[in-house]
Image: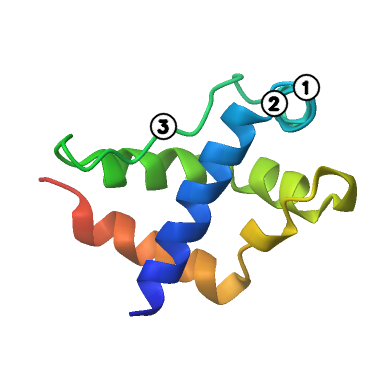
Amino acid sequence: MLYLNNLVKVHGLSFAIVHSTTIALPAWHSACREHNCNVQLIPRDVATRWNSTYGMLVVTHQYLEVVDEITANKKLQLRKYELSEQQWKIVDDLIHVLEVV
């Protein structure tokens, strides 16, 4: 059940960024630009949308450096969503499990 903790963290981070329009959202946009990434939000995991969990995890993994930077910043108060190396490995494994071929 370790994967559930990871899903909760990623889902919470996505929610926190979108709903913190004056603090976390501008920091996310800035971090995306610093890492030469397109400014894109992490898609929401919606229970009624087929495979939205997969989409959320793929974008999170693509923006790994941005996520690490944002969650490491104490001022943003997003440290509870920080993922360890082992948790990033679980995210990668989940992506492969959920991928439709």
Please, what is the three-letter code of the amino acid marked with disc 3?
Pro
Judge whether 79 appears above or below 22 on screen: below
- Residue 35 is left or right of residue 6, and the answer is right
> What secondary structure is marked by label 1?
loop
Q: Are marks 2 and 1 in contact (CB under 8 Å)?
A: yes
Element assignment for label 3: loop
Q: Horizontal placement of 25 versus 101: left or right? A: right
Left or right, 82 with reference to 88: right
In this view, the mark in front (2 or 1): 1
**Neighbour tally class for label 2: few under 14, some 14-19, many 20 plus, Cα within 10 Å:** some
Q: Amino acid at mark 1?
A: Thr
What residue does disc 2 label? 25
Q: Which mark is residue 43?
A: 3
Tell me where residue 33 appears, x and y as whole percent.
Answer: 74, 22
Snapshot colouring: rainbow
Image height of 65 relative to 5, above or below? above
Label 3: few (<14), some (14–19) or many (≥20) C-alpha neighbours in 10 Å: some
Query: Farthest residue toward the bottom?
Result: 1
The amino acid at mark 2 is: Leu
Image point (69%, 26%), residue name = 25
User: Residue at point 52% right, 64% down?
Assistant: 88
**x, y percentage for residue 24?**
74, 33
**Which mark's residue is nearer the viewer, 3 or 1?**
1
Q: Which residue is mark 1?
A: 22
- Compared to 9, does 2 lie above or below? below
SS for callout 2:
helix
Q: Quote the CA–CA distance across marks 2 and 3.
A: 14 Å
- The residue at the point 40 percent across, 47 percent down is 57
**Nearer to us in this view, 68 or 5:** 5
